[in-house]
Image (cartoon, coloured by chain):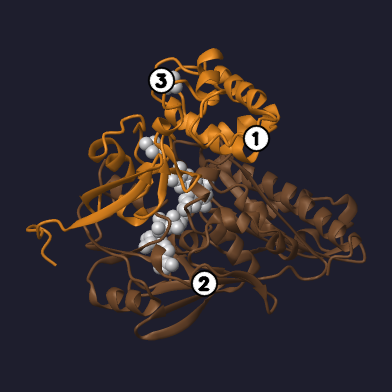
Chain colours: A orange, B brown
Amino acid sequence: MDRTTPAPEALHDVELTVNGQVRRARVPARRLLSDLLRHDLELTGTHVGCEHGVCGACTVLLDGMPVRSCLTLAVSVSGRAVTTVEGLAAEDGTLHPVQRAFQEHHGLQCGFCTPGFIMTACAFLAEEPAPDAATIRDAMSGNLCRCTGYAGILAAVAGAAEELAGTGVDPRERHRPEGAA
Amino acid sequence: MKPPPFAYHAPRSVEEALTLLAALDGAKVLAGGQSLVPLLNMRLAEPAALIDIGRIPGLDVLEVADGHVRIGAGVTHERLRRDDAVAAVQPLLRRALDLVAHPVIRNRGTTVGSVVHADPAAEMPAVVALLGGTLEVASVRGRRSIEAADLVRGPLESDVAPDELALELRVPVAAPGTGSAFVELSRRHGDYALAGVATEVAVDGGRIVGARATFIGVGTGTAVLDLSPAVAGRDAADLDVVDVAAAVAGFVEPQDDVHADAAYRRHLAGVLAGRAVRAAAADALARAGAGVR
Ligand SMILES: Cc1cc2nc3c(=O)[nH]c(=O)nc-3n(C[C@H](O)[C@H](O)[C@H](O)COP(=O)(O)OP(=O)(O)OC[C@H]3O[C@@H](n4cnc5c(N)ncnc54)[C@H](O)[C@@H]3O)c2cc1C
Ligand code: FES
Ligand code: FES
């Protein structure tokens, strides 16, 4: 095959339910899910660091399960549901308990790694509602932060677990402040 | 850090996938993408076409049948790791998968993909080589089974041909009287290991009757080391592993890299193998005591 004169790139229709809304885009097959979210759908909360799976900044939930959006072709997950950090705070802007915990416990400085940590934490707490310190450390070990030294992040996840305990809230879902419909 | 252009196909059946693989020059199978997409992003791979097998029904088989664990090409590391029925009959799978990457990577990466990818630092090719078993593959030319011993030819080179699709991996269940362990050292849990060892030990009447090991990260590919001469006849409950390190040191061929030098890796492989053999012996005794077949 002649690689010097590539044929014009074919486009594919991708349809995703992003944070509860059906979103469509027409993109080349090589469009990464991270870039689809950021460029095509203008959801820039998902951050991109290393683009080879190591840093975790791009972590989003795919059908409720954390995945690296930088290692996922958008076209390959068409038809599925994606939750990004934009899908967590309440409609009125009230922060989700995990987001609030990061703020309260100094779980961020520059904030670049934060969306990935928060999505990872939400999926983790959905599965392990009462984790001990060692389990939290292990669960967060796939994400890198160059600012905080991690102590605040671990404290934030522990704090969020405490806050969520017994509420029956699924931390992967959009926050509903008490009293809201 | 963006993939180069490629044609994309998402076949809905194995037959359709095989026809595409036969017809398209430079096509590659896309499974979980956890090894392939990084290579695309770094432009270390430039396939002309990707055949995404994620929409083929029937590749997600995961069951214990006829003395084997059947692991379909669509089964993720994490699904396999969590399966209690599998862990009961072949505990080494879960023990090794606990060490494969982080959960977020395991959620997408497939065990069959890992074996086909044949990374010399990957845990699962070493496990499959140790336990035996087969990889079932198909192409328009027909189907065949690749024996574990023939599966990995070299670093990042498996016996699966470019036009072949791996359908499922079959790993034998643990034999009575055996125990197993996977021990590795990595800088962080979930990172690729500096060195690691998978072992299976057979015990009879409280004494070791056989021990074998495979290694990762120390240049031995998936070759199996017979450690029986170093430990056979010894008391499984109070195992002396002094001779293991010497046997291992003569077997491994580590190289220097930025993470560790060869001498350290050689030392490490011996120490880890001693620990692994001890742990596997204890496991064999525990399984025998618990009345596991
Ligand atoms: C940050 C990070 C850390 C990691 N750490 C580890 C680790 O510690 N240990 C470890 O073992 N692995 C690790 N991995 C790799 C991971 O295990 C991969 O998931 C696995 O190696 C490949 O599986 P996949 O389904 O993602 O395959 P893909 O990336 O989709 O494919 C890999 C290769 O196999 C071929 N292939 C895949 N499936 C088939 C098939 N059915 N038939 C024919 N060819 C096929 C593809 O064409 C490609 O060449 C890590 C990955 C990342 C990103
Ligand atoms: S950007 Fe995806 S893991 Fe770093
Ligand atoms: S807060 Fe800056 S990288 Fe984590």
Residue at the left extreme of this rendering: A5
In the rendering, which numbered label is found on residue A168?
1
Dot 1 alpha-carbon crowd within 10 angstroms: few under 14, some 14 to 19, many 20 or more:
few
Q: Are marks 2 and 3 in contact (CB under 8 Å)?
A: no
Occupied quadrant, residue B10: bottom left
Viewer-proximal residue, B104 or B96?
A: B104
Circle nearer the viewer, 2 or 3: 3
The residue under label 3 is: A111
Three-letter amino acid code at the position of disc 2: Glu
Could you tell me residue A121's position as x and y percent? 55, 32
Three-letter amino acid code at the position of disc 1: Gly
Dot 2 alpha-carbon crowd within 10 angstroms: few under 14, some 14 to 19, many 20 or more:
many
Q: SS of the residue at dot 1?
A: loop
Q: SS of the residue at dot 3?
A: loop
Q: CA distance from mark 3 to mark 1?
A: 28 Å
Ligand 3 within 8 A of label 3's CB? yes
Horizontal side of B259 relative to B267 (left or right) equals: left
Viewer-proximal residue, B16 or A83?
A: A83
> Mark 1 belongs to which subunit?
A
Dot 3 alpha-carbon crowd within 10 angstroms: few under 14, some 14 to 19, many 20 or more:
some
> Mark 2 belongs to which subunit?
B
The residue under label 2 is: B168
The residue that appears at 38% across and 23% down in the rendered structure is A112
